[in-house]
Amino acid sequence: MKARIHVTLKKTVLDPQGQTIHQAVQTLGYHGIEEIRQGKYFEITLDDSLSREAWAALMDKLAHEVLSNPVIEEYDVALEEEP
């Protein structure tokens, strides 16, 4: 199983990197893009020692306590079965 965790700045937090990327893509001719916000992506391979529900709870805790700053960031955790 894999956990995929996306961490992004909250909408109320200024994203200077996203703004810089947005300006660059407009300069390069990519018009019609209204906003770009950047973030972090984590892909974590999990073993089968815990149930899906237990892994989900543990990954949520990891994202909240280690991978993000809950004051300025939000995160999304998704678990996916590997083929």
Image (cartoon, helix red, strand yellow):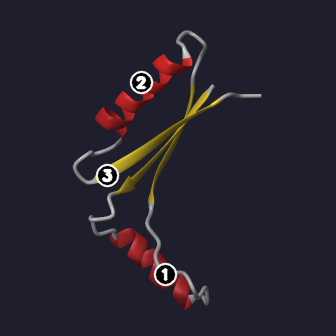
Which numbered disc flags the more N-terminal residue, 3 or 2? 2
Residue 8 shown left or right of residue 46 in the figure = left
Q: Quadrant of residue 67?
A: top left
Give how far across and how far down residue 14 sits, in percent: 28, 69
Q: Which residue is mark 2?
A: 57
Is residue 52 shown above or below 59? Answer: above
The residue drawn where x is 44% and y is 63% is 38
Q: Amino acid at mark 1?
A: Glu
Identity, as a three-letter code, of the amino acid under mark 3? Glu
Looking at the rendering, in which quadrant would you find the N terminus?
top right
Which of the numbered marks, if any, corresponds to residue 34?
1
Tell me: 16 left or right of 35. Answer: left
The residue tagged 3 is 73
Mark 3–mark 2 Cα distance, whole angstroms, equals 19 Å
Amino acid type, mark 2: Ala
Marks 1 & 3, CB-CB < 8 Å contact: no
Is residue 29 depicted above or below 75 in this figure?
A: below
Q: Nearer the viewer, mark 3 or mark 2?
A: 2
Disc 1/disc 3 C-alpha distance (Å): 21 Å
